[in-house]
Amino acid sequence: MNIHTYEKIWLAVAMVLIVGFIATVTYGAVGPGIAMIDDDGGTIDPDTINDDERFSDPGVTHVGGNEYEATVVAQAWSYTPSEITVPANSTVTFYVTSRDVTHSFTVAGTNVNTMVVPGQVSQMTVEFDEPGEYGILCNEYCGAYHHTMEGELNVVPQDEFDLTELSTDAPSEAQLGNQTTINTTVSNDMNYDLETTATLEIGDQPLDQDVTVPAHGSETVEFAVDTTDLGTGDHDWTVTVDGHEESDTLTVTNATEGGDGDA
Amino acid sequence: MSSAIEKGVDGKHPTDGTDQVRELGHDEYDPIGTAILVGIYFLILVALWIFMYFVEFLGNGPTVTGVLLTVVGIA
Amino acid sequence: MAMRNAYIDQFPKEARVIRAILWSSFLALTIGGTLGLIQGLHRTNILRFIPSQDYYTVLTAHGVLLVITFTIFFLVGIFTWAVTTSLDRGVEDIRFTWGWYIMMVIGTILVGVSILGGVVEQIPMNADVLFTFYSPLQAHPAFYIGLVLFVVGSWLAGVDWFRMWWAWKKENPDERIPLPTFMALTTMLFWYLSSLGVAISILAFLLPWSLGIIDSVNPLLTRTLFWFFGHPVVYFWLMPAYMLWYTMLPKISGGKLFSDPLARVVFVLFLILSTPVGIHHQYLDPGIAEGFKFIAMTNTMFLLLPSLLTAFTVVASMEHGARQRGGDGYLSWLKALPWRDPVFTGMALAGLMFAAGGFSGMINAGLNINYLVHNSWWVVGHFHLTVGTAVALTFMAASYWFMPQLTGKELWNRSVALVQVVLWFIGMTFMSNAMHRAGLFGMPRRTAEPQYQGFNFEPAVGTVGEINAQVALGAVLLTISVYLFIVNMVLTTVGGSSSDAIPDNTYAGTLSGPEDSPVILDNLKLWTSIAVVLVIIAYSLPLASIIDAGGLFGPGIDAWKPSVVADPTLVLESIRGVMF
């Protein structure tokens, strides 16, 4: 076959270009270590998402050291959790699945971008170096309100990050003279025990209690409240643990109002 | 006949002013202009590819990573 | 004075059906293009007069009308011209030809009405599923049936051309296949192979599912079968444009095709390589191993080769014409090209734009860099350069030559045609460039309102405002351009009278003809076999793995029928009720 010399040269140049592109992409896999989404996440039946150990309580958990896992459920038209917070200098493995149709989980302005297909779990590991605030959006059409589907990803400085949550059980009313308690359950999803202090502010005297919450566990702090000291009326209280707060109001009533009580 | 059509009479466009001035056969013609143009195109492609990959892509913040062993499916 | 020898004189019956086919194509182009303007103004928040939920109906229509209806009707029309002209014989049975055309029309009507149901309450159908119709999104059965009829009609068009070729071969046993016919046949061969994927997806899964015959489908499986077809379809759009660049453009430039053998090589490469690459549209999909994605990438990268070769051969053919017209120098021969001819200028600008689109395609082919661009507006910028210009503008420019050939009447206005093609190029430059840039900072595609509550996009250069302005400006210029085109076509056809000044129906001669190309290139059976083997290698393991892991019909995933929902909060509440 008669090919002009210039075109033969161009043919060789084109091959060099093609090989160069493949080589660059391969470098990306080997050097910076970029990996593609693949079948590591496995399959799932969307009807069993609520019972799946990964997705029954979606959110961030601490695996150990700087490693975290974030599980996310996408559905038309929201993400659960809709706000994800992780610390800087962490390595986070995301597990994302869909309840209904195909979505994406895309952190706008970054290379964190995956399809989320019902029946499949998308698994990806990302290193977060610097603090920052990012939006999460869905870029795969998923129905009439596709454009409203968004979330937030916050990468906070390490010293501002914890996986501590509070859940307080407190009565709204108590009788004057009766002992009453405010119970706060402190849960800790880090991989190590949390040694801290819980503080209840009610009336003029703060009450402190030291507490050790086990790794991936919880501990309940009982605050004994002296209603006689408080007196009748509405008393706002706040429980604080490591900057997390819960507040409500305790109304102390007279002995003669309602219920049976002592004098 | 197909050969008559294939070697074709150059149909002149009715309002086309310019005509063929000379005939260039297979052996007289060297597409040097084409070589230059595709050469320029090649340089643009290389420059843009390097920019896109190393600046836009690798500079685009947090990225999905993995151990090479899992990438090739060994681990 | 010689008797006129235009196509309508040589093949009057075929000219009639091709005219009908091109009118179907132009109608789809005009409607689809107008919808594009609505989208461009809506998502940039410059002018919104439809509810955002209807945006997705508009987008479905825009996609289907432009990349299925417009392009494929044009292809079957132009290939009918190409095969009859180059074999110098009519179709075997004109009724068969009308038959497949009407089948395609019926298919189009079914699809169109089902999509229209998304905005017209009186039509109890919905197909707000976009051109890719990914399950579990589910359309009305009419949508799927319409697509099937349209595609099967195109298969029958191929049968029409193969029959002509077999009859011609019996009478010309030692001749090489004329180049235009060679191109049409190789294109149809990979079309048959590739459309199998979407045919199976629809006939075995999506259609029975929409009729209630089966309960559920495997979304990843149907998605993979779609992309089995979804990449080769872009070459189905491109091959007619390449055919026009190889067999028309050299002649219009005043010269000859630089190399017939290389043109054959290019089409053979497309036959063997177009299909085993579809997974490059699924680089970010779960459920597909990275190794399969890497194979798809290497196949895709090699698929750059026929296009890069085309660049050389086509430009060399143009240079030949320029030099025959008196041009010389290293680059000043460019001035000697017939820039006042809208057929030439349209095709040349389309080719130039394709060079840019080719680059963004090279990026799209890259495996890991896909994280940057997947489902962003970059992709939309890319395909408006390729199908939107390389293909669409070439088709429009070629029509300025074809309509006179098919009607025997002169083009209504050459200056308007020249303005039209230049306006398209300028409009697309603004719009596509802005889309590419927007994709780089994460602006998504397929979204009615890319304005989010919790965050703003942060362009490294420029602002979202100026990007939106350029997209809207581009959309307006493109719409004006498409209307200039359709007006010219209408007035050419209905106005004026028969003219003797129509040039003969011919196509380009060659500097290096088929006699210089190895006979093995014409061995269509060989290349088809290789194509099949490559597809089996690329797809059998991924498909087996998807079916094995997720089931042929999935684990029982509910259908999602998109419909206009009155109050999203009610929907979300009912979903949360199901969740907990």
Image (spheres, rainbow, N blue to C red):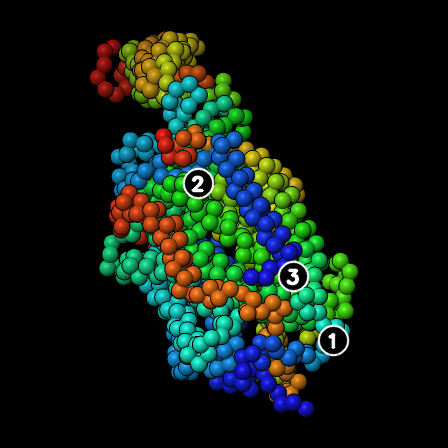
Q: Percent position (x, y) of residue A72?
A: 38, 35
Q: Nearer the viewer, residue C250 or B31?
A: B31
The amino acid type of the residue labelled 1 equals Asp
User: How far apart are the two marked residues, 1 and 2, measured between alpha carbons?
Assistant: 57 Å
Q: Percent position (x, y) of residue C31?
A: 52, 67
Is residue C569 positioned above or below C155 on the image?
A: above
Q: Nearer the viewer, residue A201 or C143?
A: C143
Q: Are marks 1 and 3 on the same chain?
A: no
The amino acid type of the residue labelled 2 equals Thr
Q: Who's the residue at 72% across and 77% down the image? A: B16
Please name which of the two marks, 2 or 3, marks the residue nearer to the observer.
Answer: 3
Q: Secondary structure at mark 2?
A: strand
| Residue at far left of view | A260
Q: Are marks 1 and 2 in contact (CB under 8 Å)?
A: no
Work out whether residue C479 can be spotted.
Answer: no
Q: Percent position (x, y) of residue A258?
A: 25, 21
Q: Chain of mark 3?
A: C
In the picture of the structure, the residue carrying the numbered disc 3 is: C315
Q: Quadrant of the N terminus of chain C?
A: bottom right
In the picture of the structure, the residue carrying the numbered disc 1 is: B19
Q: Quadrant of the C terminus of chain C?
A: top left
Q: How many discs appear?
A: 3
- Residue C213 placement: quadrant: bottom left
In the picture of the structure, the residue carrying the numbered disc 2 is: A114
Q: Secondary structure at mark 1?
A: loop
Q: Chain of mark 2?
A: A
